[in-house]
Image: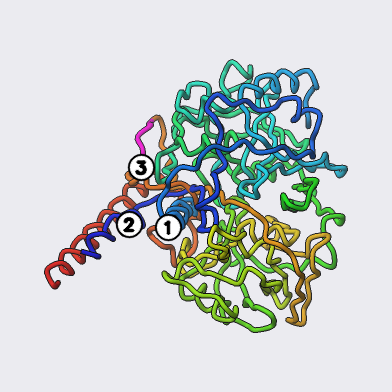
Amino acid sequence: MIAVALLPLALWTLCASAFFPYTPVWLKEKKELSLPVEAKRNAAAYAVNRGVSFALERKAGRNNGSPASRASKQAIWLRTKYGHANSAAAANVDLEKRSANSYHVINATQPTQSMAAGIDQDGTDYSYFITAQLGSKARQFYMLLDTGAGSSWVMGSSCTDKACTMHNLFGSGDSDTLVEAKKSFTISYGTGTVQGSIVSDAISVAGISVQYSFGLASKTSDDFAYFAFDGILGMSMSQGASANFLKTLADAKKLDKNIFGVSLNRASDGTNEGEIRFGATNADKYTGDISYTAVGKDGDWAIQLDDMAYDGKKAGTGGVLSYIDTGTSFIFGPADLVKKLHAVVPGSGSDDGLTFKVPCDSDKSLTFTFSGVDYQLSPRDWISPKDSSGKCTSNIYGHEVVQGAWLLGDTFLKNVYAVFDRDRKRIGFAAAAGSQSASGDGSPTSTSTSPTTGTATNLTGQVSGTSGSSTPSNQSPMGLGGHETGAAGSGRDAAKPTESSKSSAASAGRRCWAQVASSILMVALAVVGA
């Protein structure tokens, strides 16, 4: 009977695709961040009060099942993903339109450096996004900043789904220069899909304008109704359903160096000074030196992790790739490695090997080591707030989103300044300004802090692009979240998010159903044996 009960989860895990808002155990009893369908974005706040925090509107949380099932859902979603400013008049027009939606956002302060944009967030460390201007009329859109995705898209004016009714939409009426490419795209997200057509138009990000081919969604999963962003800006090096944004910038020769530096704000730190800067780094955002590690997998922002430690005790969890993903909120890893990490944390324990209870009063940082340099992960980020029973959990979960690898999301990235170097195929880290300094001697420092409330956003999906066809890929849509992985490289997990052509998507579907059949057979044998 246990085997039968677990069958739905098994099937879900095998076939699910990406982007999921993961709700960890400590968030179960809290009211979920959500928005009334008729809610509006505060246009005046956006235009005038950048950097000011607003109270979040909340309603009774939805019952999404046990914490374990929620964790599984996010991990499933993630598997499927790993796959100049214009005139004030134009901006004001769009802000009036934006007021048709209301997502309370902590807007970032205006950067002082060139080719830089503030990174806004939803006030819960849940998702991080920037403002992009599209088309001849420079319409403004929030786009999730996602280093784990190769595809970019926004919601289109022809979309009538729930999420689209709550967001800014883009179409031919918003631009005189929009060109349709007569090519469709589909991204499966677990609980639904995003699909539409590929278009080409001007996009401006951080004062950099280029002609860009991106997706215009005519159908969008309802999950996106709970997020402030209107689409996704893929920042991976891999090729997705749309043109690769980083390659587009490189081909247009817009940057002296094809790099970008990312600084993420922690909501509890106050004024949001999060920023992305293209073409150069910003020394104000970090302390010490930037240490680089070569990218170990073609197309993906993935580097080898040396090890992790707690209070100087090494966990022996290194020697594997770590995917660095701004589009993922938490940290995920293979269950055995997550278990080894928590084994060096006194007082930790788990009933399922996926979620670990940890002492709420721990004031120790975790240490992540890359290329011999240690980076501290504050307990404000890796330890959850207390639940109603007074217990805390770790924000590092035992879900193998990418086979044999770690997935390091915003929980980690809030503690460092991250540099993504496309030219030299490497990622650099330095201690974030105001945080604990990085060191090369393996000796972590600690600080006494209280945990930060946060939620998770992860965007990933199985992606297929077809010419002149809107036929979805043969995937079972089971959840949102994840990391789109590049096609090159070995050791790919069949259940891991990928971007593919129609034929390869069908092949993935056949593999999925072969796994389903195998699982059903195993369950049947287990029942007979019982």
Q: Earlier in the sequence, mark 1 or mark 3?
A: 1
Alpha carbon separation for disc pair 2 and 3: 22 Å
Query: Do tag 2 and tag 1 residues touch (Cβ < 8 Å)?
Result: yes
Q: Secondary structure at mark 1?
A: helix
Q: Amino acid at mark 3?
A: Ser
Per the rendering, the mark at residue 473 is 3
In the visual, does 428 lie left or right of 458? right
Asked if one can make out residue 237 in the rendered structure from this viewpoint, the answer is: no
Q: Give the camera-side residue of 304 and 169.
A: 169
Q: Name the residue carrying label 2.
A: 9
Identify the residue shown where x is 78% and y is 71%: 438
Q: Main secondary structure of the magenta part?
A: loop
Badge nearest the viewer, 2 or 3:
2
The reply to whether the magenta stretch includes residue 43 is: no
> Dot 2, how many residues are within 10 Å of its Cα: few (below 14), some (14-19), or many (20+)?
few
Alpha carbon separation for disc pair 2 and 1: 8 Å
Q: Position of residue 274 (x, y in %)?
A: 76, 48
Q: Position of residue 176 (x, y in %)?
A: 63, 17
Image quadrant for the N terminus?
Answer: bottom left
Identify the residue shown where x is 67% and y is 61%: 451
Q: Position of residue 282 (x, y in %)?
A: 84, 53
Q: Amino acid at mark 1?
A: Ser
Q: Earlier in the sequence, mark 2 or mark 3?
A: 2
Q: Name the residue carrying label 1.
A: 72
